[in-house]
Amino acid sequence: MRARTRDTGALLAALGSILCFGSTPVFLRAFIHDLDSWTVNGLRYTVGALFWLPFVVVFLRDAQSHSRVRPRHGVWKSALVPALVNTLGQIAWAAAPYYLEANTIGFVYKMNFFFTILFGVLFIREERPVVKDPWFLAGTAVCIAGVVAMFVQNLHAGGARSAVGMAILLASTVLSGAYAVCVRQFMAGYPARLSFGVISLYTAGSLLVLMFAVGDYGAVRSFPVSLWPVLVLSAITGIAFAHVLFYRAIQGLGAIVSTGLQMSTPFVTLLGATVFLSERLTFLQSVGGVLVVAGGFMLVLAQSHLRPQGRLLR
């Protein structure tokens, strides 16, 4: 009975993370007419980081309960590189909605798993055999075909502006893949919530500096009161909850199953964008989106042949 309870909790966590990740592009599109991306980034990440700040403080003060992990104060040094990569990725991620619709962002962003594997192959020796797996080669080809289809459609519909948006979005996926490998390389031995909390604090501080340096933060004064709860909710769900729920799912369901389920997040985005933003995919965009998701499943399958479930990168 206890095992069944744990499995149920893990499944609910997986579903929760899918909803959180899938809804984020929809939330971000809601702010594009009132705030610039630098200000949205600074505000959202500050809210998300402050949510986990009490946990970080308590954990670092409780030496006896965490004697099995690496020196607790070393987490601040270890988190520097992942935080830098995460900050760069967040800059690109927040800028994409100003050029592209939520649906395009939701589907193309699933390419981040391909780049996670790619950076793993480049920098981690035990990752390299995956390139010989037929599913890896097939998944890579299918993902690229899907992105090309989405790119061609957006270029046809939006011209140079859409091309810039696609470049920004692809940069975001590359940095997301690099971030996953950095977390594995630099944060091994620290609990996920502590790692994410410290990285979030670094990232929030950096994004706040950028907001005051180059953002139009004065626009906050005229930001609609009705959108403040939406902004806070987007930060709590998309930053504070999404990753922790995903880690909880991995603990109960395994990394392969959990990551496979994550491939459904673009369809949550599709539903939200249709209902709340009245956005629609064209036929070619639909084909491209399905190809990206199908290719992602193939990549998950390739990694399932490489390692035990608990070692999958994210």
Image (cartoon, grey):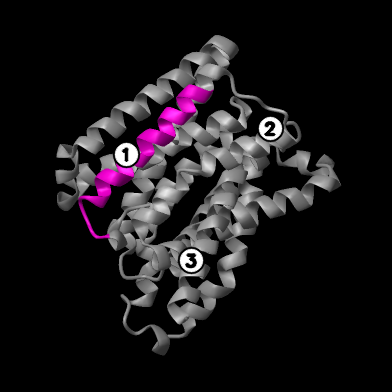
Q: Earlier in the sequence, mark 2 or mark 3?
A: 3
Q: Report the front residue among 286 and 152.
A: 286
Checking the image for residue 274, the label placed there is 2
- Count the numbered circles shown: 3
**Residue at 31% over, 55% down:** 312
Q: Element under label 1? A: helix
- Look at 51% across and 72% down and name the residue there: 56
Magenta span: predominant SS is helix
Say left or right for 17 vs 122: right
Q: Amino acid at mark 2?
A: Thr
Residue bearing mark 3: 10
Q: Amino acid at mark 1?
A: Met
On screen, 192 above or below 281? below
Q: Position of residue 166 (x, y in %)?
A: 49, 24
In the picture shown, does residue 102 fall above or below 15?
above
For the residue pair 56 and 297, the one nearer the viewer reads as: 297
Query: How far from the left and from the top, in percent, is residue 267?
Result: 56, 38
**Residue tagged 1:** 298
Q: Which residues are magenta?
A: 286-308
**Secondary structure state at the residue bearing disc 2:** helix
Query: Of the residues shown, which amino acid type is indicated by label 3?
Result: Ala
- The answer to whether 221 is drawn above or below residue 188 in the figure is above
Given residues 47 and 9, the one toward you in this image is 9
* x and y percentages locating residue 46 in the rendered image: 62, 56
Q: Is residue 230 above or below residue 196?
A: above
Mark 1, residues whose alpha carbon is within 10 Å: few (<14), some, or many (≥20)? many
Side of 150 relative to 46 (left or right): left
**Earlier sequence position, callout 1 versus callout 3:** 3
- One can see residue 213 in this view: no
Cα–Cα gap, marks 1 and 3: 23 Å
Would you identify the image quadrant in which residue 299 lies? top left
Disc 2 + disc 3, Cβ < 8 Å: no
